[in-house]
Image: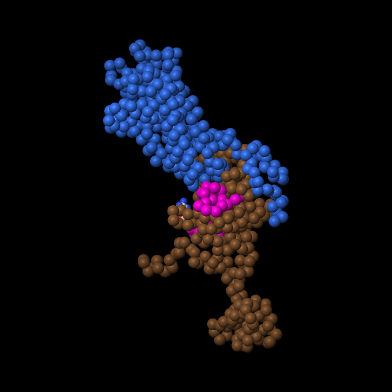
């Protein structure tokens, strides 16, 4: 096989080449600089995120819902009405309304859009077959999962935090003169609004994890809706004493504690809520990582 | 170089690839043939680690695929199943793959041009025709300048110009010293491109041979001779390892001697021949013969349909 020598003279790995040292190839081609690194996989996932129209639309819808419902809730607020105009769920579970809880009314809707975004980013690769190209390029597989999470989490966090701020600011004139009016500088307001962004950033990662775990958009979206919206309702069928003990730890309840202005008596503190919700996400990610590495694609 | 050793894949209790060993060498085009469902695509997925073998192993350039620092630089692959997100443009798709390996934008443009996709590089892949999708797949296989190129039915969906392009491309890649492996069901098409043949059926190795040997064996179909002196010629041609049969009084079918020999012998003894025809078995027929017992999806004879209608 004289042709082999012509191109490269390979010594099949006596020791695995884990360091950055170049392969012991003969330098016949100037292309030996090619190498997969964590940063490069991240760069690739970043580019994939921004080059799909469906991704951009879903992201836009999420932020739009967040701002729209927050602002509307503030404008339609009347102190006499019971509860808020939003649907039951996170954001309105803490009883009395305040300027922040009104501003984050849209989280209930935005979390679905953001979660779906995560699902599409991950499960969409399976339904289209793109995953085969992706994993052929990164056969160690796990960097793909981490990179997807590391791309979508911060993007969702930043944009939805801005969205929550915008909702609050847009809603402020609507609450002009009301007892519950607050300004950005007031105690806990910024923390709560950033908390909403943090929660939604984690929801996005949760969506990615579900997508990689279930490999199917419809299934993963169903699971997302089930966990975030239906689980708390189902759990109310539990005996009261159990429910009271367990309910703060449900993903959506722990999550809503992150962006509540005042900690309600039956909820976790923002920090604890964040830890618990992040724990759920981490658990799902671990399951996704296991399936990603273990099963054929 | 690809080396498969006792490669086995089971899905449930169905053994799809069965104890398969073969080698794809550098500087050669290896044709990977087998009827539908023989396990070609499954084998190729195992080569790049998308499916893991139930037993056995396969290495690429001496190690398992996932252990390479730059896997796409070792082996570029075109898979049978669609492996592209239809919502992304061809350029962005290639760019996303390029980023993982630190491949430059210039190289991306280069393979786009090589594959003849320049005018549609910005279009959504979902709008591509079958052939354009295939060209994109070939472009991504070549993206990282791989030492091995492995293509699953590359000419599927290509027009004659495209088929010729692939044929010349693969020949060129092998001549540069790369290992090329391509799967196909078409023996005659593969024989034009390949040097080496690995033929499988029901996941098992049926033949590991060169195209030349296969062709030589295929043409061993005997020589048909027609003469008025059949009986005389028969005794002249007889010998060890030579079989002669006849279907009519003036016809002989001779195997073991080629047409030239037969003609010479006949001339020497003044036997007039009025037909002397080598009975070439087509490559396709030889292939079907080889795989007859192992075809997974046997078609019913065409006339049963008419009966049913
Ligand atoms: N993921 C899977 N699960 C179960 N069975 C599978 C799977 N993938 C392939 N098979 C089965 O394995 C067999 C071999 O399939 P494969 O696609 O490898 O054949 P092939 O030689 O590429 O066929 P073709 O020429 O039609 O492309 C088929 O019977 C197929 O049904
Ligand atoms: Mg196939």
Query: Residue shown at 62%/82% (left/top)?
Result: B274
Is A292 left, or right, of A103 in this rendering?
A: right
Is A47 left, or right, of A60 in this rendering?
A: right
**Residue A104 in sight from this viewpoint:** no
Chain A shown in which color? blue
Query: Residue shown at 61%/69% (left/top)?
Result: B217
Residue B174 coordinates in the image, percent (x, y): 66, 54
Residue B56 is one of the magenta-drawn residues: yes
Residue A70 coordinates in the image, percent (x, y): 38, 22
Above or below — where is B27 with respect to B245? above
Query: Residue shown at 67%/79% (left/top)?
Result: B261
Residue B85 coordinates in the image, percent (x, y): 50, 42
Q: Nearer the viewer, residue B224 or B209?
A: B209
Quadrant housing residue A274:
top left
**Residue B269 in sight from this viewpoint:** yes
Q: Which chain is brown?
A: B
Residue A198 coordinates in the image, percent (x, y): 45, 25
Report the magenta residues as a range.
B32-60
Above or below — where is A40 with respect to A2? above
Is B266 left, or right, of A56 in this rendering?
A: right
Query: Residue shown at 67%/38% (left/top)?
Result: A21
Q: Nearer the viewer, residue B168 or A129?
A: A129
Q: Quadrant of the C terminus of chain B?
A: bottom left
Is A17 left, or right, of A119 in this rendering?
A: right
Q: Nearer the viewer, residue A69 or A239?
A: A239
Above or below — where is B178 with respect to B259? above
Q: Nearer the viewer, residue A194 or B306?
A: A194
Count all numbered tags in the image, as a single digit: 0
Residue B241 is one of the magenta-drawn residues: no
């Amino acid at each position: 096989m004289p042709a082999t020598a012509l191109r490269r003279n390979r010594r099949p790995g006596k020791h695995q080449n884990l360091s950055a040292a170049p392969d012991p190839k003969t330098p016949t081609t100037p292309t030996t600089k090619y190498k997969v690194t964590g940063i490069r996989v991240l760069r690739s996932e970043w580019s994939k995120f921004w080059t799909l129209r469906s991704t951009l639309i879903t992201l836009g819808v999420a932020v739009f819902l967040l701002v729209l419902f927050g602002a509307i809730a503030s404008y339609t607020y009347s102190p006499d009405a019971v509860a808020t105009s939003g649907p039951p769920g996170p954001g309105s579970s803490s009883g009395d309304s305040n300027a922040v809880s009104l501003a984050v009314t849209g989280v209930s809707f935005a979390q679905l859009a953001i979660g779906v975004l995560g699902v599409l980013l991950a499960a969409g690769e399976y339904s289209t077959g793109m995953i085969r190209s992706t994993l052929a390029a990164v056969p160690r597989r796990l960097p793909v999962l981490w990179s997807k999470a590391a791309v979508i989490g911060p993007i969702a966090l930043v944009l939805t935090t801005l969205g929550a701020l915008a909702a609050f600011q847009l809603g402020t004139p609507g609450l002009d003169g009301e007892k519950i009016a607050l300004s950005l500088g007031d105690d806990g307001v910024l923390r709560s609004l950033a908390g909403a962004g943090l929660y939604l950033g984690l929801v996005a990662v949760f969506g990615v994890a579900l997508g990689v775990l279930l490999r199917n958009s419809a299934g993963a979206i169903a699971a997302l809706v089930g966990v975030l919206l239906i689980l708390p309702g189902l759990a109310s069928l539990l005996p009261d004493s159990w429910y009271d003990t367990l309910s703060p730890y449900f993903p959506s309840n722990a999550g809503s504690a992150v962006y509540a202005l005042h900690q309600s008596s039956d909820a976790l503190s923002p920090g604890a809520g964040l830890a618990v919700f992040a724990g759920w996400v981490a658990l799902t990610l671990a399951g996704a990582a296991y399936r990603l590495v273990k099963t054929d694609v | 170089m690809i080396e498969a050793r006792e490669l086995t894949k089971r899905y449930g209790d169905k053994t799809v690839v069965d104890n398969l060993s073969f080698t794809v060498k550098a500087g050669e085009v290896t044709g990977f043939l087998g009827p539908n469902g023989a396990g070609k695509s499954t084998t190729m997925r195992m080569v790049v680690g998308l499916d893991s073998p139930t037993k056995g192993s396969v290495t690429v350039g001496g190690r398992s695929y996932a252990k390479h620092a730059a896997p796409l630089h070792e082996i570029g692959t075109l898979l049978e199943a669609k492996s592209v997100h239809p919502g992304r443009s061809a350029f962005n798709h290639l760019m996303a793959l390029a980023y993982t390996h630190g491949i430059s934008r210039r190289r991306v443009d280069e393979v786009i041009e090589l594959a003849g996709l320049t005018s549609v590089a910005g279009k959504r892949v979902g709008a591509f025709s079958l052939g354009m999708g295939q060209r994109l797949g070939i472009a991504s296989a070549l993206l990282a300048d791989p030492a091995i190129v492995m293509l699953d039915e590359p000419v599927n969906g290509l027009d004659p110009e495209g088929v010729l392009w692939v044929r010349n491309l693969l020949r060129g890649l092998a001549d540069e010293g790369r290992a090329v492996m391509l799967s196909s069901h078409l023996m005659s098409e593969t024989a034009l491109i390949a040097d080496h043949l690995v033929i499988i059926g029901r996941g098992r190795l049926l033949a590991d041979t060169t195209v030349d040997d296969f062709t030589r064996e295929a043409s061993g179909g005997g020589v048909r001779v027609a003469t008025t002196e059949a009986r005389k010629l028969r005794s002249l041609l007889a010998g060890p390892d030579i079989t002669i049969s006849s279907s009519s009084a003036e016809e002989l079918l001779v195997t073991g001697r080629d047409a030239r020999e037969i003609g010479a012998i006949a001339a020497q003894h003044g036997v007039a021949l009025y037909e002397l025809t080598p009975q070439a078995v087509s490559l396709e027929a030889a292939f079907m013969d080889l795989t007859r017992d192992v075809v997974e999806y046997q078609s019913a004879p065409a006339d049963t349909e008419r009966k049913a209608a």
